[in-house]
Image (cartoon, coloured by chain):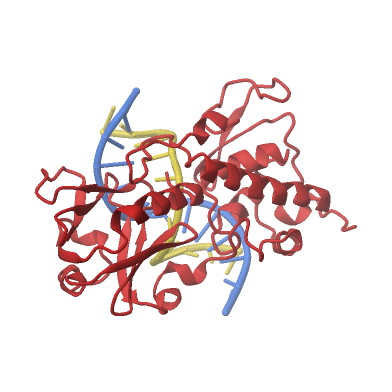
Chain colours: A red, B yellow, C blue
Amino acid sequence: MPEMPEVETVRRTLTPLVAGKTIKKVEVWYDKIIAGDARAFAQKLAGKQILRVDRYGKFLLFRLSDNLTLVSHLRMEGKYRLLAPQAAVGKHDHVQFAFTDGTALRYSDVRKFGRMQLVETGTEREQTGIGKLGVEPNSPEFTRDFLCRALAKKSKKIKNLLLDQSVVCGLGNIYCDEVLWQSRIHPLSQASAIPSEKVTALHDNINQTIALATKLRGTTVHTFLDADGQSGQFQKKLQVYGHAGEPCQRCGTVLEKIKVSGRGTTFCPQCQVLYREKHKQD
DNA sequence: GCTGTTGTTCTCCG
DNA sequence: GCGGAGAACAACAG
Protein backbone atom coordinates (compact mmCIF):
# COMPACT_ATOMS: atom_id res chain seq x y z
CA MET A 1 0.00 0.00 0.00
CA PRO A 2 1.63 3.16 -1.06
CA GLU A 3 2.96 5.37 1.66
CA MET A 4 5.29 8.27 0.95
CA PRO A 5 8.32 6.23 -0.23
CA GLU A 6 6.12 4.25 -2.60
CA VAL A 7 4.40 7.35 -4.01
CA GLU A 8 7.78 9.03 -4.48
CA THR A 9 9.00 5.91 -6.31
CA VAL A 10 5.96 6.05 -8.57
CA ARG A 11 6.61 9.74 -9.22
CA ARG A 12 10.23 9.06 -10.19
CA THR A 13 9.46 6.14 -12.48
CA LEU A 14 6.42 7.82 -14.01
CA THR A 15 8.15 11.09 -14.85
CA PRO A 16 10.32 9.88 -17.77
CA LEU A 17 7.35 7.92 -19.15
CA VAL A 18 4.92 10.84 -19.35
CA ALA A 19 6.73 14.18 -19.08
CA GLY A 20 6.38 16.20 -22.28
CA LYS A 21 3.61 14.00 -23.69
CA THR A 22 0.34 15.43 -24.92
CA ILE A 23 -2.97 13.84 -23.98
CA LYS A 24 -5.06 12.90 -26.98
CA LYS A 25 -8.02 11.19 -25.35
CA VAL A 26 -9.09 10.22 -21.84
CA GLU A 27 -11.36 7.28 -21.13
CA VAL A 28 -13.00 6.75 -17.76
CA TRP A 29 -14.36 3.24 -17.21
CA TYR A 30 -15.30 3.71 -13.57
CA ASP A 31 -16.70 7.16 -12.78
CA LYS A 32 -16.29 7.11 -9.03
CA ILE A 33 -12.50 7.31 -9.34
CA ILE A 34 -13.02 10.88 -10.57
CA ALA A 35 -14.02 13.61 -8.14
CA GLY A 36 -16.65 15.68 -9.90
CA ASP A 37 -18.02 15.06 -13.37
CA ALA A 38 -16.09 12.33 -15.18
CA ARG A 39 -17.14 13.48 -18.63
CA ALA A 40 -16.00 17.05 -18.03
CA PHE A 41 -12.78 15.65 -16.57
CA ALA A 42 -12.04 13.73 -19.77
CA GLN A 43 -12.98 16.62 -22.04
CA LYS A 44 -10.84 19.16 -20.21
CA LEU A 45 -7.78 16.93 -20.34
CA ALA A 46 -7.80 16.38 -24.10
CA GLY A 47 -5.04 18.37 -25.78
CA LYS A 48 -3.18 19.14 -22.55
CA GLN A 49 0.51 18.46 -22.16
CA ILE A 50 2.03 16.87 -19.05
CA LEU A 51 4.81 19.18 -17.93
CA ARG A 52 6.07 17.27 -14.90
CA VAL A 53 4.95 15.13 -11.98
CA ASP A 54 5.13 16.42 -8.39
CA ARG A 55 4.30 14.78 -5.08
CA TYR A 56 2.87 16.11 -1.86
CA GLY A 57 2.55 13.63 1.00
CA LYS A 58 0.95 10.61 -0.64
CA PHE A 59 -0.62 12.69 -3.42
CA LEU A 60 0.70 12.75 -6.99
CA LEU A 61 0.30 15.99 -8.94
CA PHE A 62 0.49 15.93 -12.71
CA ARG A 63 1.33 19.50 -13.76
CA LEU A 64 -0.35 20.24 -17.07
CA SER A 65 -0.39 22.99 -19.65
CA ASP A 66 -3.11 25.67 -19.41
CA ASN A 67 -2.55 26.01 -15.66
CA LEU A 68 -4.17 22.69 -14.77
CA THR A 69 -3.11 20.10 -12.19
CA LEU A 70 -4.34 16.53 -12.02
CA VAL A 71 -4.29 15.47 -8.39
CA SER A 72 -4.15 11.69 -7.97
CA HIS A 73 -4.20 9.62 -4.81
CA LEU A 74 -3.45 5.90 -5.11
CA ARG A 75 -4.97 5.11 -1.70
CA MET A 76 -4.34 1.42 -1.21
CA GLU A 77 -3.75 -0.28 -4.51
CA GLY A 78 -3.81 2.30 -7.28
CA LYS A 79 -1.24 1.71 -10.03
CA TYR A 80 -0.12 3.44 -13.20
CA ARG A 81 1.49 1.76 -16.16
CA LEU A 82 2.34 2.66 -19.73
CA LEU A 83 0.99 0.48 -22.53
CA ALA A 84 -0.55 0.54 -25.97
CA PRO A 85 -3.94 2.30 -25.87
CA GLN A 86 -5.66 -0.64 -27.54
CA ALA A 87 -4.39 -3.16 -24.97
CA ALA A 88 -7.14 -5.31 -23.48
CA VAL A 89 -8.99 -3.50 -20.69
CA GLY A 90 -8.63 -5.47 -17.49
CA LYS A 91 -11.28 -5.82 -14.82
CA HIS A 92 -9.48 -3.37 -12.55
CA ASP A 93 -8.49 -0.80 -15.18
CA HIS A 94 -10.45 2.39 -14.56
CA VAL A 95 -8.91 5.33 -16.41
CA GLN A 96 -6.78 5.67 -19.53
CA PHE A 97 -4.86 8.67 -20.82
CA ALA A 98 -3.97 8.07 -24.49
CA PHE A 99 -1.12 10.23 -25.74
CA THR A 100 -0.48 11.67 -29.20
CA ASP A 101 2.72 9.60 -29.51
CA GLY A 102 0.75 6.34 -29.60
CA THR A 103 1.32 5.29 -25.98
CA ALA A 104 -1.15 5.40 -23.11
CA LEU A 105 -1.04 5.74 -19.36
CA ARG A 106 -3.51 3.44 -17.65
CA TYR A 107 -4.71 3.60 -14.05
CA SER A 108 -5.83 0.40 -12.36
CA ASP A 109 -7.04 -0.07 -8.82
CA VAL A 110 -8.37 -3.35 -7.40
CA ARG A 111 -10.03 -1.66 -4.44
CA LYS A 112 -11.38 1.31 -6.43
CA PHE A 113 -10.32 3.52 -3.51
CA GLY A 114 -8.05 5.83 -5.49
CA ARG A 115 -9.24 9.31 -6.46
CA MET A 116 -8.38 11.80 -9.20
CA GLN A 117 -9.32 15.44 -9.33
CA LEU A 118 -8.60 18.08 -11.95
CA VAL A 119 -8.03 21.53 -10.50
CA GLU A 120 -6.51 24.83 -11.50
CA THR A 121 -2.83 24.87 -10.59
CA GLY A 122 -2.38 26.70 -7.31
CA THR A 123 -5.82 25.83 -5.95
CA GLU A 124 -4.99 22.24 -5.01
CA ARG A 125 -4.54 23.14 -1.36
CA GLU A 126 -8.09 24.47 -1.11
CA GLN A 127 -9.76 21.91 -3.33
CA THR A 128 -8.21 18.62 -2.29
CA GLY A 129 -6.96 16.83 0.79
CA ILE A 130 -3.54 18.39 0.21
CA GLY A 131 -4.59 21.43 2.20
CA LYS A 132 -4.89 19.32 5.32
CA LEU A 133 -1.42 17.84 5.09
CA GLY A 134 1.17 18.58 7.75
CA VAL A 135 4.93 18.60 7.25
CA GLU A 136 6.88 15.98 5.35
CA PRO A 137 9.58 13.80 6.91
CA ASN A 138 13.09 14.93 5.90
CA SER A 139 11.82 18.43 5.13
CA PRO A 140 13.31 21.54 6.77
CA GLU A 141 10.03 22.04 8.66
CA PHE A 142 10.15 18.58 10.21
CA THR A 143 12.43 19.40 13.12
CA ARG A 144 12.79 17.62 16.41
CA ASP A 145 11.12 20.61 18.10
CA PHE A 146 8.20 20.45 15.71
CA LEU A 147 7.58 16.82 16.62
CA CYS A 148 7.99 17.60 20.33
CA ARG A 149 5.37 20.33 20.15
CA ALA A 150 3.02 18.18 18.07
CA LEU A 151 3.20 15.38 20.61
CA ALA A 152 3.07 17.56 23.71
CA LYS A 153 -0.45 18.83 23.08
CA LYS A 154 -1.99 15.54 22.01
CA SER A 155 -3.65 13.10 24.35
CA LYS A 156 -4.17 10.55 21.63
CA LYS A 157 -2.21 7.40 21.09
CA ILE A 158 1.14 7.81 19.35
CA LYS A 159 0.22 5.37 16.60
CA ASN A 160 -2.88 7.37 15.72
CA LEU A 161 -0.92 10.59 15.79
CA LEU A 162 1.68 9.27 13.37
CA LEU A 163 -1.06 8.09 11.01
CA ASP A 164 -2.68 11.54 11.13
CA GLN A 165 -1.53 13.18 7.89
CA SER A 166 -2.31 16.66 9.24
CA VAL A 167 0.65 16.40 11.62
CA VAL A 168 3.32 14.52 9.69
CA CYS A 169 2.32 13.40 6.22
CA GLY A 170 3.60 10.34 4.45
CA LEU A 171 3.60 7.68 7.13
CA GLY A 172 1.15 4.82 6.77
CA ASN A 173 0.49 1.71 8.79
CA ILE A 174 3.66 -0.13 7.84
CA TYR A 175 6.21 2.59 8.54
CA CYS A 176 4.36 3.58 11.72
CA ASP A 177 4.86 0.14 13.20
CA GLU A 178 8.48 0.11 12.06
CA VAL A 179 9.49 3.48 13.51
CA LEU A 180 7.74 2.78 16.80
CA TRP A 181 9.59 -0.53 17.11
CA GLN A 182 12.89 1.14 16.24
CA SER A 183 12.22 3.83 18.82
CA ARG A 184 11.11 1.27 21.45
CA ILE A 185 7.80 3.06 21.93
CA HIS A 186 4.60 1.08 22.51
CA PRO A 187 1.97 2.01 19.91
CA LEU A 188 -0.66 2.66 22.60
CA SER A 189 1.53 5.20 24.39
CA GLN A 190 -0.09 8.57 25.00
CA ALA A 191 1.68 11.03 22.70
CA SER A 192 2.16 13.70 25.36
CA ALA A 193 3.63 11.16 27.80
CA ILE A 194 6.59 10.24 25.63
CA PRO A 195 9.84 11.59 27.12
CA SER A 196 11.76 14.05 25.00
CA GLU A 197 14.77 11.81 24.38
CA LYS A 198 12.36 9.27 22.93
CA VAL A 199 10.84 11.93 20.69
CA THR A 200 14.34 12.65 19.40
CA ALA A 201 14.81 8.98 18.60
CA LEU A 202 11.40 8.85 16.94
CA HIS A 203 12.20 11.90 14.83
CA ASP A 204 15.51 10.40 13.69
CA ASN A 205 13.93 7.02 12.96
CA ILE A 206 11.13 8.55 10.89
CA ASN A 207 13.61 10.45 8.74
CA GLN A 208 15.99 7.52 8.34
CA THR A 209 13.28 4.96 7.63
CA ILE A 210 11.54 7.11 5.02
CA ALA A 211 14.89 7.92 3.39
CA LEU A 212 16.02 4.29 3.29
CA ALA A 213 12.64 3.03 2.08
CA THR A 214 12.64 5.63 -0.69
CA LYS A 215 16.14 4.59 -1.70
CA LEU A 216 14.98 0.97 -1.87
CA ARG A 217 12.00 1.92 -4.04
CA GLY A 218 9.42 1.37 -1.35
CA THR A 219 7.84 -1.65 0.25
CA THR A 220 5.96 -4.33 -1.64
CA VAL A 221 3.75 -6.13 0.84
CA HIS A 222 0.69 -6.93 -1.15
CA THR A 223 0.81 -5.72 -4.69
CA PHE A 224 2.73 -2.46 -4.87
CA LEU A 225 4.56 -1.97 -8.17
CA ASP A 226 6.07 1.21 -9.52
CA ALA A 227 5.36 2.58 -12.99
CA ASP A 228 8.12 0.34 -14.40
CA GLY A 229 6.36 -2.70 -12.98
CA GLN A 230 9.07 -3.29 -10.41
CA SER A 231 8.48 -4.24 -6.80
CA GLY A 232 10.08 -2.39 -3.90
CA GLN A 233 12.86 -3.81 -1.75
CA PHE A 234 12.15 -2.36 1.68
CA GLN A 235 9.98 -5.30 2.71
CA LYS A 236 13.22 -7.18 3.35
CA LYS A 237 14.04 -4.60 6.02
CA LEU A 238 10.73 -4.79 7.88
CA GLN A 239 11.25 -5.76 11.50
CA VAL A 240 7.68 -5.94 12.79
CA TYR A 241 5.05 -5.42 10.08
CA GLY A 242 3.99 -8.84 8.86
CA HIS A 243 6.09 -10.56 11.51
CA ALA A 244 3.52 -11.08 14.28
CA GLY A 245 4.12 -14.36 16.09
CA GLU A 246 7.82 -14.29 15.26
CA PRO A 247 10.58 -13.40 17.74
CA CYS A 248 11.58 -9.75 18.13
CA GLN A 249 14.96 -9.23 16.43
CA ARG A 250 16.15 -7.28 19.48
CA CYS A 251 14.99 -9.28 22.48
CA GLY A 252 13.51 -12.52 21.16
CA THR A 253 10.06 -11.96 22.64
CA VAL A 254 7.22 -13.06 20.38
CA LEU A 255 5.78 -10.06 18.52
CA GLU A 256 2.12 -9.36 19.23
CA LYS A 257 -0.57 -8.06 16.95
CA ILE A 258 -3.41 -5.85 18.17
CA LYS A 259 -5.90 -3.40 16.71
CA VAL A 260 -5.34 0.31 17.24
CA SER A 261 -8.29 2.32 15.94
CA GLY A 262 -9.14 -0.44 13.53
CA ARG A 263 -5.59 -0.77 12.17
CA GLY A 264 -3.52 -3.90 12.48
CA THR A 265 -0.58 -3.08 14.73
CA THR A 266 2.42 -5.32 15.37
CA PHE A 267 4.82 -4.61 18.22
CA CYS A 268 7.12 -6.16 20.80
CA PRO A 269 5.41 -6.27 24.20
CA GLN A 270 8.79 -6.58 25.92
CA CYS A 271 11.04 -3.85 24.55
CA GLN A 272 8.50 -1.26 23.38
CA VAL A 273 7.70 0.85 26.43
CA LEU A 274 4.15 1.96 27.18
CA TYR A 275 4.14 5.59 28.33
CA ARG A 276 0.95 6.56 30.11
CA GLU A 277 1.63 9.43 32.45
CA LYS A 278 2.62 12.96 31.67
CA HIS A 279 6.41 13.06 31.51
CA LYS A 280 8.41 16.01 32.72
CA GLN A 281 10.04 18.05 29.96
CA ASP A 282 13.78 18.60 30.31
C1' DG B 1 -20.34 -16.35 4.68
C1' DC B 2 -17.55 -14.06 7.78
C1' DT B 3 -13.04 -11.85 8.91
C1' DG B 4 -9.07 -9.19 7.94
C1' DT B 5 -6.90 -5.88 5.10
C1' DT B 6 -5.82 -0.08 4.64
C1' DG B 7 -5.95 5.74 3.54
C1' DT B 8 -8.96 9.13 3.67
C1' DT B 9 -13.33 11.16 4.67
C1' DC B 10 -17.41 11.27 7.10
C1' DT B 11 -20.15 10.93 11.25
C1' DC B 12 -21.03 10.50 15.93
C1' DC B 13 -20.12 11.29 20.86
C1' DG B 14 -18.71 13.51 25.07
C1' DG C 1 -16.50 23.72 18.60
C1' DC C 2 -13.15 20.38 19.27
C1' DG C 3 -10.57 16.14 19.82
C1' DG C 4 -10.95 11.53 19.47
C1' DA C 5 -12.77 7.24 17.88
C1' DG C 6 -15.05 4.41 14.82
C1' DA C 7 -17.68 3.55 10.44
C1' DA C 8 -17.85 3.72 5.53
C1' DC C 9 -15.90 2.88 1.28
C1' DA C 10 -14.47 -1.45 -1.88
C1' DA C 11 -12.80 -6.00 -3.31
C1' DC C 12 -10.37 -9.91 -2.51
C1' DA C 13 -7.99 -13.86 0.05
C1' DG C 14 -8.47 -17.31 3.23
Q: Residue A52, located in which quarter of the rendered image?
A: bottom left
Give the answer, above or below, for where A12 lies relative to A1. Answer: below
Give the answer, above or below, for where A42 lies relative to A115. Answer: below
A31 horizontally vs A10: left or right: left
Q: Residue at x 46, y 52 (%)?
A: A8
Residue A189 visible in the shown view: no
Q: Residue at x 33, y 42 (%)?
A: A228
> Whole-percent x and y of residue A116?
30, 63
A107 horizontally vs A268: left or right: left
Give the answer, above or below, for where A125 lies relative to A83. Answer: below
Which quadrant is home to the C terminus of chain A? bottom right
A125 horizontally vs A97: left or right: right
Numbered marks: total:
0
> Whole-percent x and y of residue B7?
45, 53
> Whole-percent x and y of residue A130?
46, 68
Q: Residue A138, located in which quarter of the rendered image?
A: bottom right
Q: Residue furthest right?
A: A282
Looking at this view, is A1 or A51 the one in front? A51
A170 horizontally vs A52: left or right: right
Q: Residue at x 34, y 54 (%)?
A: A16
Residue A271 visible in the shown view: yes
Give the answer, above or below, for where A114 lies relative to A274. Answer: below
Q: Residue at x 38, y 47 (%)?
A: A76
> Whole-percent x and y of residue A160?
59, 52
Which quadrant is home to the N terminus of chain A? top left
Looking at this view, is C9 or A184 the one in front? A184
